Amino acid sequence: MIRMKVLVTASSKHGATAEIAEAIAKEITRGGFDVDLIAPTEVESIDGYDAVVLGSAVYMTQWTENARAFISRFREQLRTVPVWAFSCGLAGVPNGEAQDPRRVGPALLDINAIDHQTFKGRLELTNLNLRERSIARMGAAPEGDYREWDKIRAWANQIVQDLKEHTPEG
């Protein structure tokens, strides 16, 4: 059997989204696939990848500039490989819902992702700069780690199942 190669890349400002990407990469590796975990700014090419998992932290309803730039650089290629996308945000966390994916902006519309999930994030005020802390306080953003690791791993395992259904025989 030919082993498929998967790129997992996520733009993270304070580390929470990167940790989600690490968990996803670990599950996909456990599923039997070759996985490269690389920050979007460090990806030089997506040639040779059979699938991409792309994620971003969400700030003010938008994916980070690094995630948007990644999509812009590789837009045409991303349309030719299976892509799964995830967002990590805090909006509405006390009510049990993370950032509304329809408000992430036009970035995802360009790549026709197979699936897009929104995961709750983490907010540690001590990690923020003064401007970010002020915005968090004005918006009454709840401090804490709200990531749902079981949900994240389950989604990664769904990606594994989807990939296995499309793995070429060799």
Image (tube, rainbow, N blue to C red):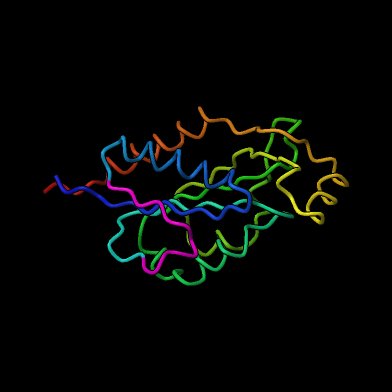
Q: Which span of residues is magenta-colored?
A: 34-45
Q: Is residue 125 left or right of residue 6?
A: right
Q: Quadrant of the N terminus?
A: top left
Examine the structure image and report whether residue 142 is included in the region drawn in magenta.
Answer: no
Q: Seen from this angle, which residue lies furthest front? A: 126
Image coordinates of residue 87 in percent, x first then y, are 58, 48
Instruction: Please determine whether, in this image, residue 85 is positioned above or below residue 156.
Output: below
Q: Nearer the viewer, residue 117 or 59?
A: 59
Image coordinates of residue 114 in percent, x first then y, are 44, 50
Image coordinates of residue 17 in percent, x first then y, are 56, 46
Q: Seen from this angle, which residue lies furthest right? A: 138
In which quadrant of the rendered view does residue 139 lie? Answer: top right
Q: Residue at x 48, y 61 (%)?
A: 40
Q: Nearer the viewer, residue 144 or 24?
A: 144
Q: Residue at x 75, y 36 (%)?
A: 143
User: Looking at the image, how many numbered discs can be counted on the residues?
Assistant: 0
Image coordinates of residue 74 in percent, x first then y, are 44, 69
Q: Is residue 126 left or right of residue 15?
A: right
